[in-house]
Amino acid sequence: MAMKKLLNNWFAQALLFLLALGLTAYVSQVINDVLPPYVLIIGLFIGINLIMALGLNLITGVTGQLSLGHAAFMSIGAYSSAIATVNYHLPFLLGVLIGGLVAGLFGLIIGFPTLRLTGDYLAIATLGFAEIVRVQFTNMKITNGAIGFLGIQGSTTFPIVMTIVVLTIFAMVWLENSRNGRAMLAIREDEVASSAVGINTTLYKIQAFAIGAFCAGVGGALFAHTTTFIQPTDFGFLKSVDILSIVVLGGLGSIPGTIIGAIVLTAAPEALRSLSNYRMMVYGLLLIVIMIFRPYGLLGGVNLRQVVRRALMWPKKKQSGGRA
């Protein structure tokens, strides 16, 4: 009871959040000093993919809107951040924020005409938007066209990425447990019924789309400052499929599942690199096997709150049973 009251207190929640953030920064800095560079690079890409996948999970997993254009927002964030830091010499973190905001703005603009669509029509519309963005970046002088954008500083570090990951996870957990999050879940379950009870379905879908696009933009900005070179082909259709695969593999609507999916699908190709030409075949076979035995994803349909609650109650039940 005391713990429940503590968690319901806003001040206590803020304090716990700051403690978790500080602990994350400290632990990630220790890990950064210990692990070899190759492992750290894999960790960076796991974190970047996780940030983008959490945004797509809000759109597709929580709100139920199938989007195949997430790579477009990633590219908008990457190029916006690169232009801000290289051409205008802005600080790295400010460039990351600009990348997220510009991508979120485009998500808001695109959301108005496209999110009145549903299902396959929405997927086709977002796919078309992604191709338009890619072609535009290929023909723009400010992005250096198909040659690629050079001269980006490698400012992304493991502690920065892990801190942003924790921020994103906290934000998504808070959002899903808020009134807006419950409205988004209702839209996923039955959009017609949600509209009938007074939920503005278009508004909440646009909100989810803008927040998801912001996360993709932040991930793209971190990606650009990790690779130090970006080109339009880095953000093609297959990139959107990769991010969607993380969400589907982990389980639609599951934040812990998205975390596991990002780790598995980012680390698996590197772990199978020794198999050379058979690497992608084994990788694809692994995905097929997982989807056969877990068609709803690794943690799809699993209520982690009930699992934790039962785990905490189990010792008490065992103890009371022993006394009986």
Image (spheres, rainbow, N blue to C red):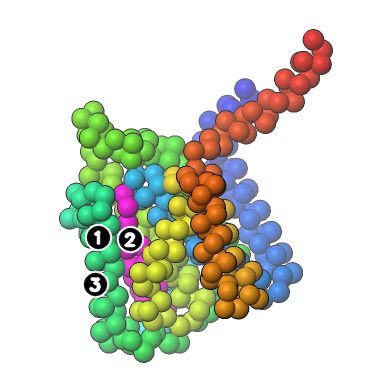
Residue 97: % across, % down: 41, 65
Query: Is residue 205 highlighted in magenta?
Result: no
At 28% from the left edge and 44% from the top edge, which residue is drawn? Answer: 204
Residue for badge 2: 68
51 left or right, relative to 35: left
Q: Residue furthest top?
A: 324
Q: Compare residues 268 and 185 and report the one nearer the observer.
A: 268
Residue found at the very far right of the displayed protein: 323
Q: Indicate yes or no whether the magenta region holds residue 81.
A: yes
* Crowd class of label 1 (few under 14; some 14 to 19; many from 20; radius 10 Å): some
Q: Position of residue 8 (x, y in %)?
A: 53, 30
| Quarter where residue 212 is shown | bottom left
**Horizontal side, residue 69 vs residue 8: left or right:** left
| Quadrant the N terminus occupies | top right
Circle 2/circle 1 CB separation < 8 Å = yes
Quadrant containing the C terminus is top right
Amino acid on which the number 3 mark rests in the picture: Ile
Can residue 230 be seen by looking at this rendering?
Answer: yes
Q: Which residue is mark 3?
A: 132
Highlighted range, magenta: 65-85
Residue count near mark 3 (Cα–Cα under 10 Å), binned few <14, some 14–19, many ≥20: few
Label 2: how many Cα within 10 Å (few below 14, some 14–19, many 20+): many
Give whichever of 165, 307 is nearer the camera.
Answer: 307
Q: Secondary structure at mark 3?
A: helix
The residue under label 1 is 124
How many labels, in total? Answer: 3
Residue at the spot x=28%, y=57% of the render?
Answer: 123
* Dot 1 amino acid type: Ile
**Label 2: element kind:** loop
